[in-house]
Amino acid sequence: MKKTLADIDVKRKKVLVRVDYNVPVDANLKIINDKRIMSTLPTIEYLLKKNAAIILMSHLGRPKGKVIPEMSLKPVADRLGEVLGKPVKFVGGDCVSDESKKAAKDLKPGQILLLENLRFHPEEEGKNAAGEKDKPSMNAFAKELASLCEVFVQDAFGTVHRSHASTAGIVKYIKDAAVGFLVEKELKFLGEALENPVRPFLAILGGAKVSDKINVIENLLDKVDSIIIGGAMAYTFLKAQGVSTGVSLVEDGKLDLALDLLKTAKERKVNFLLPVDHVITNKVDFVSKSMPSDAVVETTIDEAICNGFMGVDIGIKSIEKFAEVVKSVKTIVWNGPLGIFEIDEFSKGTVEIAKMVADATDEGAISVVGGGDSVSAVKKVGVDKRISHISTGGGASLEFLEGKDLPGIAILPDKK
C-alpha cells in the first residue's frame, strides 16, 4: 500500500501535484470536456483546507518538446479558477523559467499556481532537443521541478505508466511524496478487483487486436472465473477454431496464440465466452466512421460469417448469452468495446453490455470500467453514475490489468 495524501503533513507547505489536465479543446481553445479537471478537485480542496500552497503541473497534447501556443495550459487555469471560485495563477511559456520559479517561490498558503505544459520540454519524456534519449537531461529537469516544492503528490493516474520526469524522475529529489485521492481510488478499485475480488469474477474485453490485450488476457486467466471476448479480437479466436470469419479483421499471425489461450482457459476452468452470432456488413467507411448507404447489414444465425462480409458487432443471441453471465457475477472488469461502437448502427452490443454492467452493479456487484470506448459507452447510455469505478487512465489501467508495475506508482514510498 502506497503512502497517501492523508498520511503526510501538508499544512502551510508548498505542495507540487502532478495532475492530468490533458483535456480536449476546440479550434477556439475552449475546453470541450472538463472531467479531468473536475476529478482533481478532492485533492485540491483537501490541500486548500490544509492551507497548503498548491503548484499544479500537467501536459497537454503532444508538442514533442516544442512550445506550441495552441497547447498552452492557460485555458485550463482559467477553467479551474472558475470551478474553484478563486484565481489560479499561471505563467506561460516555460514551466521552469525564472518567472515560473519566482511565481512558485512567492506562492502563499491557500494560493494555486498552474505551471505551463511540461511537454514543451523534451526532457519531460526523457529526450534532448534533438529528440534523442537523454536520461541525464531528464533527471536534471526532474530536479528543477522538485526544487519548486517541499512535498510531491501524484494524482495523474493517466500518466503513471510513463517513466517521465514529472511522474517517476521527480520522486528521487523529493523528501516527502504520496498518491493523491484520485490515484488512491484507482489503486483501490483496480487492485482489489485483481487481488481480492468478490467472486464470481468476470472480465469483459473488447477491441480490435488480440496483440493489444495478450498480456491482459494471460494475467486475467489466473484470476477470473469467466471472460467475455468481443470486438474484432473475437474473430481471431473463432478463426483459430476453424470458424469462417469472412473478411473480418483477423490477426492471422496470432491464431496459434489464440488456441493456446483457449487451452489455458480450459485447464484453469475459466468460462471463456465468444460471440455465438454477429451483426455483419459488406461495407464500412472507416475513415468517416459511418455505414455507406448501399451497405448490406445482416445478423448471422451462428458463429460463422460468410464470404464478403465482416463482423461489426455481436448479435442478439450473444447479448442474451453474455447477459446470463453478467447477472451471475459479483466483480466485473470491462475494457474495450464489443463492436464498432463509433458507428451507431454497430453499437448495440456495447450499449447493451453497458446496461448489463450497470444493472449488475445495482444488484450489488463491483464494477470497474476502463478504456476510452468503454467509458464513452457507459456515459452515452447514461449509466456512468451506476458504475462502481470509471478509470481515468486508459493506458495505465490496461497495464495495471496486465500485472505490470507502473513506474509513477512503484517509485512512491509505501505506508509504514
Image (spheres, rainbow, N blue to C red):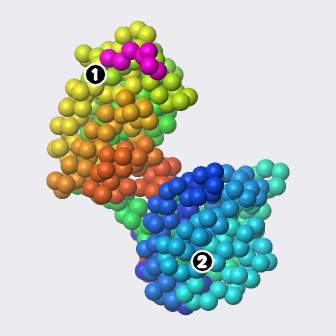
> Would you identify the image quadrant in which residue 204 lies?
top left
Side (left or right) of 228 relative to 91:
left
Q: Residue at x 59, y 52 (%)?
A: 26
Does 330 appear above or below 208? below
Residue 394 point in image, percent of width and height: 48, 50
Q: 10 Å neighbourhood of mark 1: few (<14), some, or many (≥20)?
A: many
Residue 15 painted magenta: no
Q: Residue at x 28, y 48 (%)?
A: 332
How many numbered marks have been drawn onto this rendered protein structure?
A: 2
Between 191 and 311, the one nearer to me in the picture: 311
- Give the labeled residue for mark 2: 88
Residue 47 point in image, percent of width and height: 49, 82
Residue 65 point in image, percent of width and height: 75, 55
Task: Provide the secondary structure element on which disc 1 rests.
Answer: loop
Look at label 1 and name its amino acid. Asp
Side (left or right) of 59 relative to 358:
right
Checking the image for residue 277, the label placed there is: 1
Instruction: State which tag comes first along the sequence, 1 or 2.
Output: 2
Q: Residue at x 39, y 22 (%)?
A: 311
Q: Which residues are magenta?
A: 292-298
Q: 10 Å neighbourhood of mark 2: few (<14), some, or many (≥20)?
A: many
Task: Provide the secondary structure element on which disc 2 rests.
Answer: loop
Q: Quarter of the image containing the N terminus?
A: bottom left
